[in-house]
Image (spheres, rainbow, N blue to C red):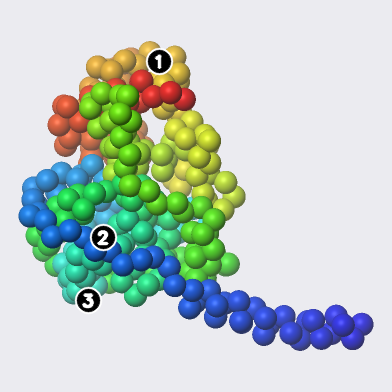
Amino acid sequence: MRFWLIAAMAAPAFAGVVLAGLHFWPIGRAEAVENLEADPGRGAYLARMSGCIACHTNADGGGKPLAGGVALPTDFGTFYSPNLTTDPEHGIGGWNLEDFARALRQGVAPDGSPYFPSFPYPFYSSLSDQDVADLWAAFKTVPPVAEPSKAHEMLPPFNLRAGLKVWRARYHDPAPFSPNPDKSDLWNRGKYIVEGPAHCGACHTPRNLLGAREAEMALHGAEELPDGGKSPPITQKALKDGGWAINSLSYALKTGITPDGDVFGGSMGEVVRDGTAFLTDEDRKAIATYLLEREN
């Protein structure tokens, strides 16, 4: 009895020590981005490819471009996309290139705190120094919007951001893009887009109870998306069984129109409207080529 009494009295202190340890556990590494000549036009293109416009512009709520505020309801709580304008107080106007690279490729804020994986930084680790420099040049052209980012509404214990450090240690394995030398340049371009900036696996891969993607089921579809819907598998077999070909998939990524004359709805409709419709024909063909020739 005395043992359990002592244990009960010590538990809060132990929990406090654990939380303090998590708080001071350093994550991430310094980003030494090569000093490159940046192209803001290419950066704007990459921003479209990466879904930045769709996720950080609350168009339905009358929000200004990249000012954030888009809600993403999940089983863990509701996430709200932050302000990415050049406002120095409420946006990223006070950042530098290294801060930007660290956030994108590592999911670590300038103050050293971890971002929730609702921000698809695990995919952005494939971005090259040139990609990051170009994106940064593009974001610096965005007019400032003095609007605070809305705080996430997370359920306990997921509201303890320090706990994300444990999640990262278990599930986050950043790696640069690695092309397959046995495949064509078009196939590798598609691989880079699908597995990198376009982060197709964020919606088309099932997740476990802690919200981590099940790597062995990549692109096999997901039953519970944040908006309550589900995503179909986009594996080679599933696409071919569904009657898709490279040309029809490329066309659908441009127009949203499927081979049977139907149209994409829901979040995929938004992906086309705000993202893939702006890509070049060559890049849409690369995506389709990779998906339809990828070994599942």
Instruction: Check if mark 1's residue and mark 3's residue have beta carbons within 8 Å.
Output: no
**Residue at 79% of width from left, 81% of height from top?**
7
Q: Which residue is mark 1?
A: 240
Question: Residue lying farthest right?
Answer: 1
Dot 1 or dot 3: first in sequence order is 3
Which amino acid is tagged 1?
A: Lys
Which amino acid is tagged 2?
A: Ala
Q: Quadrant of residue 81?
A: bottom left
Q: Which residue is mark 2?
A: 101
Q: Disc number at residue 89?
A: 3
The x and y percentages for residue 194 are: 32, 36
Which amino acid is tagged 3?
A: Glu
**Residue at 43% of width from left, 68% of height from top?**
27
The x and y percentages for residue 235 are: 43, 25
Q: Is residue 24 visible?
A: yes
Dot 2 or dot 3: first in sequence order is 3
Assign a secondary structure to mark 2: helix
Q: Is residue 176 left or right of residue 26?
A: left
User: Are there few (<14), some (14-19), or many (20+) residues within 10 Å of tag 2?
Assistant: many
User: Are there few (<14), some (14-19), or many (20+) residues within 10 Å of tag 1?
Assistant: some
Residue 105 vertical placement versus 225 (above, below): below
The x and y percentages for residue 193 are: 28, 37
Spatial distance from mark 2 to mark 3, Cα to Cα? Answer: 19 Å
Assign a secondary structure to mark 1: helix
Q: Say which quadrant the N terminus sits in.
A: bottom right
